């Protein structure tokens, strides 16, 4: 069973510049939608990218997986739900994109990020204690 540590929903309206020649949102733009939702999620736990840097860590994406179910089209309003589901060894966020009007699922994805010490540039094999603190978890 997956534990949910934090969750947000971000509303996005597909813009003309998001479209490919087939008049649907280009698949690469989904990563941008996930980034917008991820930033909202990190803001809710008070550990934005700026906060990460200030705490001495970078958190690069090391894995991203996407399953496309239906296309997003111009002007479509969507909701990107972001759920923080793992934190101990990596930051794993699951995403689901829904059509705002119908609630139909459009896409599922997840990203994984690992902490990198900014001074040594070494990947950390466990998340730094600051992340648990931001989640309100006692170590």
Image (cartoon, rainbow, N blue to C red):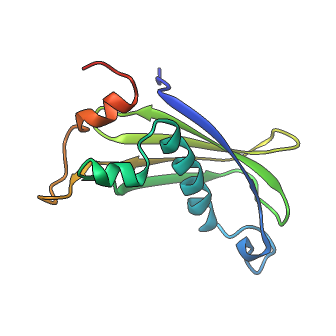
- Residue at point 50% right, 26% down? 4
Name the foreground residue: 16 vs 65.
Answer: 16
Instruction: Residue 93 in the image: state x and y as whole percent.
Output: 48, 41
Report the number of discs: 0
Instruction: Residue 47 in the image: state x and y as whole percent.
Output: 41, 43
Is 62 situated above or below 124? Answer: below
Give left or right: position of 65 versus 132. right
- Residue at point 82% right, 63% down? 73
Is 136 situated above or below 50? Answer: above
- Residue at point 52% right, 37% down? 44
Give left or right: position of 38 versus 76. left
Given the current orientation, which residue lies at the most extreme left position? 120
Given the current orientation, which residue lies at the most extreme right position? 101
Instruction: Residue 136 in the image: state x and y as whole percent.
Output: 38, 23
Name the foreground residue: 90 vs 109.
Answer: 90
Instruction: Residue 49 in the image: state x and y as whole percent.
Output: 41, 53
Give left or right: position of 70 versus 90. right
Given the current orientation, which residue lies at the most extreme bottom position? 21
Give left or right: position of 4 versus 15. left
Quadrant that contains the C terminus: top left
């Amino acid at each position: 069973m997956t534990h949910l540590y934090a969750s947000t929903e971000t509303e996005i309206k597909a813009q003309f510049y998001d479209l490919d020649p087939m008049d649907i949102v280009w698949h690469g733009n989904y990563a941008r939608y996930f980034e917008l939702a991820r930033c909202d999620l990190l803001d809710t736990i008070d550990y934005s990218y700026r906060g990460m840097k200030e705490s001495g860590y970078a958190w690069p994406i090391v894995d991203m997986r996407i399953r496309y179910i239906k296309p997003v089209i111009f002007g479509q309003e969507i909701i990107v739900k972001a759920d923080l589901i793992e934190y101990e060894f990596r930051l794993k966020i699951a995403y689901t994109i829904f059509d705002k009007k119908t609630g139909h699922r459009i896409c599922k994805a997840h990203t994984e990020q690992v902490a990198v010490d900014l001074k040594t540039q070494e990947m950390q094999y466990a998340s730094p204690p600051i992340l648990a603190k931001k989640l309100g978890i006692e170590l």
